[in-house]
Amino acid sequence: MPVKIINVSRHRCSLGEGIYYSARYNCVFWVDIKQQLLYRMDYTTKAVTATPMPEQIGWIKETRSGRFIVGLQSGIYWLNDDLSCGECFLQLSDEPAGNRLNDAKTDQAGRLYFGTMDNSETATSGSLYQLTSLNENRNLHKVDSGYVVSNGPAINLAGDRLYSVSSAIRTIYTFSVDSNGQLADKRQHIVLPAHHGYPDGITVDSQDNLWVACWQGHGLCCFDPAGKLIERIVLPAPQITNVTFGGPAYSTLFVTSACTGMDDDALNHYPLAGSVFELDVGVTGVAEPRVNDN
């Protein structure tokens, strides 16, 4: 696949993550987890604004009614119209005190899957959750556990396979998903070799291939549905964190990165570490469904 970097947003993030494209607003959102910032970039003008959050923020998603929610350290919150943090929708009171929300994705039925992780990245206290709706019933289910860092997740085009990442052990799992959202048949799908780094955020393209951000891997890996590596893209930043397709035709691959933990020599060598990259990778993606709030 031909690859071209078409733009770089040089707002250096300590830990850029949670990249999301809103077709309704033609904007790209991402977060800086450690600096507790929510970024918004107009896709056309490239103008960027940053909104502070009261806690570490892992992700932002759009609902079917057009509102936004965010995953903060302690739970899920509504955003106000000006993107400031609003009311808490759901607190994860059963999570250990040292955990935080980390990554999320929505399936075709509007179910939200999100993970938690140990903030110190040592304990296997992270879990994977499924939230079926944002209505008053708050149907929240813990569907997997035992993660140090839960990442991903992503859903295939048919909606019958869920990918979930256990970053600390370089492993991407798959689950089968039935029409009611029940998960079964957890299987080891991909184990990233050490020279490719650690799997982080993931997304699926219009050909059902899986794109993987590679932390400490200096780029991206693309796998076919069988788990075969079909593409490797090197980027000018070592810590790549998340990926999503966006733009009106979903022909741009947006990639976040991080500079946390890098010393001055490393930052001088990789001046774009912490930036958001826009790539033309020769394939298109698909829109992420909105979260069900009916």
Image (tube, grey):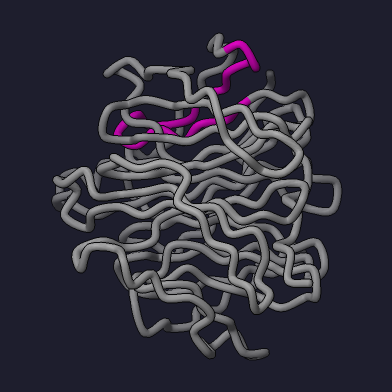
Residue toward you, 147 or 69: 147
Residue at image x 48%, y 17%? Answer: 189
Residue toward you, 208 or 135: 135
Residue 276 position in % (x across, y down): 51, 53
In the depicted structure, whether residue 154 falls above or below residue 113? above
**Is residue 34 on the magenta stretch?**
no
Residue at image x 56%, y 9%? Answer: 228
Q: Is residue 275 shown left or right of residue 264?
A: right
What's the magenta region?
A: 210-226
Residue at image x 64%, y 27%? Answer: 3
Quadrant, the C terminus: bottom right
Residue 40 position in % (x across, y down): 60, 71
Residue 177 position in % (x across, y down): 65, 33
| Image quarter of residue 156 | top right
Residue at image x 53%, y 38%? Answer: 202
Residue 101 position in % (x across, y down): 39, 61
The secondary structure making up most of the magenta span is strand
Residue toward you, 120 or 12: 120
Quadrant, the N terminus: top right
In the depicted structure, whether residue 156 falls above or below residue 138? above
**Is residue 216 on the magenta stretch?**
yes
| Image quarter of residue 137 | bottom right
In the depicted structure, whether residue 20 falls above or below residue 232? below
Q: Is residue 261 shown left or right of residue 185?
A: left
Residue toward you, 56 or 162: 162
